[in-house]
Amino acid sequence: MVKQMSSQSGRPWGYLISLLFNSLCLVIIGKQGQLLKNSRNSDNLQGLGWSRKAAEEAEAASQYSCSGHGYVFVDTFHWNQDGTPTCECNECYMGLNCSQIDPDCVSNADSGDPGFLEPFWIANAEVGATVIPAWYRMSYIINDVQKSVVSPELEKQIHDIHALVGNAVTEGRYIVLKIGSMHLINAVVNSLVEILLHLSPRHSLNPAQVVAASPFYGGYGVQTELFDSGDNIWTGDGRAWTERTESLNSTTFIEFVTSPNNPDTLLDEAVLEGKNVKTVYDHAYYWPHFTAISRPADEDIMLFTLSKLTGHAGSRLGWAIIKDYDVYQKIYKYVATSTFGVSHDTQLRATTLLKAVISGYRHIRSRTEAIDSESKQMIFHYAYSVMRRRWERLERILNMSDRFSLQNVGPLYCNFFRKVTGPSPAYAWVKCEKEEEEEDCAAVLEKAGIIGRGAEAFGADKRYVRLSLLRRDDAFAVLERRLQSLICYNNHCEDIFSSNQTDSWAQF
């Protein structure tokens, strides 16, 4: 009996010994594989030559997660006692690894900083990376042959991205680069004034009126007034001139039309017309993640910016697409004289980013397909899903109360996505509906810990305030919480925060 039991119990022990042996072998093999992988990575770095140190520094910085609420960059300058870099925390987060949240933090919804695209580029780090040699295009000009300050490859990518999206006609057009679209404003105004004075000499004694229909982007007035030229003057709302027929015919105008508009995100059109009017269309937000693409824009002068396309606001790149060669020449001359073009480093980075965007759609058979494995390279699908979800969540919160209302934006057919898409605007144009709050809606929200941009900045009624939906996920989460706290009392509101506030990789 004892021998029989020993024999039966010996089988499990042998099995365990065998399992342990096999597991040990797998661990050893795994370690060897990891060592081999690290060795190969090291060999690859060694093969990089002069770029190895820069690659190592970039890779090392990217290894710090900062609890998902901050970053370490190559140029991070604060260091801990143990020799590790200090995380640069997102707003409302703090601590060595950004793991602590400030419960009293206010929501900063004023800025148009497009941080919502950071996760896309983290997931696509390889295709979006740019390596710049120390001797890269050190001259003022791109090369000695063309004598140009504009990269031909970047110009090609700008043509290609508009052809892909179908949001602007670029064939037979001229492109001018500038340090962000803000600098393009004055370049365009200065150049158009000269043309208007030539066309209408009898108006030369009066400055050209720079206008935009209210609510308008405040940057037009800021730029015009900053340079304080005697040839032009900012006079605000263009609609005010439509009722002054005599003045309308005896004055020259430069009208800016933002479409989609900032702040109310509507697809606006010009309000003035005539030989004495030059119209400039600012299409910074005319991309499929912010609005449906209904047609390729084909105006005389159109402005675009990299910041609202790829999210790289800090790179400071804007471009104008121009029909008329004489207008192009004047704007190009102004740019070349005032800043001598745009940094070659910025142009290289923009070229890489646009190539990455275009390559993400190169092998897609149908834009209406929702393929997870491919959507991570499809920036417009990714960005639309984020902005659409944010708008839906904001609507759910504000619909709980009759105290506030949102601008009326509805679904439209999008030629790019080839389907009807719901609204996904960059901003919420919020109106305070209560009579006691009509005087200053921005002040009402500020008391609740929400900083928006007041309507005065847009030449509009104080009952309105603009809230940015473009910022990082952390910032939008704080905005949601603050709005819910403002609207809901005694826990009577539905809790809409039980799930993750943003599903960045949701199927389109």
Image (cartoon, rainbow, N blue to C red):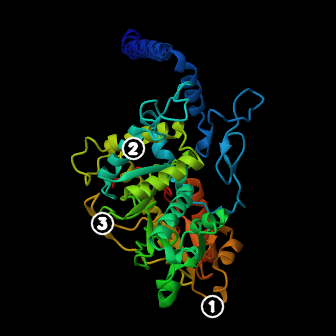
The quadrant of the picture occupied by the C terminus is bottom left
Disc 2 and disc 3 in contact, CB within 8 angstroms: no
Q: Write down the quadrant of residue 485 in the picture.
A: bottom right
Q: Name the residue tied to disc 2.
A: 155
Disc nearer the start of the sequence (2/3)? 2
Tell me residue 443's x, y (percent).
69, 76
Tell me residue 61's x, y (percent).
60, 31
Q: Name the residue tied to disc 1.
A: 435
What amino acid is found at the position of numbered circle 2 in the picture? Glu
Q: Name the residue tied to disc 3.
A: 294
Q: Which of 364/187 is in front? A: 187
Measure how far apart labels 2 and 3 are at the Cα level. Answer: 24 Å
Looking at the picture, does residue 232 appear above or below residue 13?
below
- Along the horizontal axis of the image, is 438 left or right of 131? right
| Residue at left offset 33%, top offset 59% | 167
> Farthest residue toward the left?
365
Can residue 311 be seen from the camera position used here? no
What amino acid is found at the position of numbered circle 3 in the picture? Ser
Q: Which of 35/302 is in front? A: 302
- Along the horizontal axis of the image, is 1 left or right of 466? left
SS of the residue under disc 1: helix
